[in-house]
Image: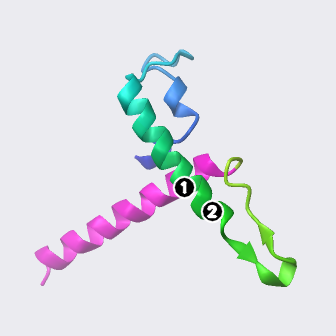
Amino acid sequence: MPSCHDSKQTLVSFLGNLVDWWEPATKASYLKKAQCIIRQYENYSIPHLGGLTLNGINTQGENIADNGGIKEAYRAYGESQIVYS
């Protein structure tokens, strides 16, 4: 599930220990994608609150998990259209 791949889980091993267990190339790829999510959410603003914006760093774990959930739901919808059409 997407929530197991949020920013905090990158440092938790399968045994639950706090370690940096990712291969360097994997970690670099993840951090690049996480930075994209951070920038995306920092660009959202609420005009009627004076242009208030989100702090993409503080919310990145939830944002990554939410994006993963939306992606999975979209894939499931696509599969249902193939099966049931």
Q: Main secondary structure of the magenta part?
A: helix
| 47 relative position to 68: left or right | right
Q: Amino acid at mark 2?
A: Tyr
Q: Is residue 60 magenta?
A: yes
On the image, the x and y values in percent for residue 12 come to 52, 23
Q: Quadrant of the C terminus?
A: bottom left
On the image, the x and y values in percent for residue 16 come to 51, 19
* Residue lying at 67% horizontally and 71% vertically, measured from the top left: 44
Mark 1 — residue?
A: 37
Q: Amino acid at mark 1?
A: Ile
Q: Quadrant of residue 76?
A: bottom left
Mark 2 — residue?
A: 41
Q: Residues within 10 Å of mark 1 (few under 14, many from 20)?
A: some
| 76 relative position to 70: left or right | left
On the image, the x and y values in percent for residue 53 come to 76, 66
Q: Is residue 4 visible?
A: no
Q: Is residue 40 visible?
A: yes
Specify the segment rendered in magenta: 59-85
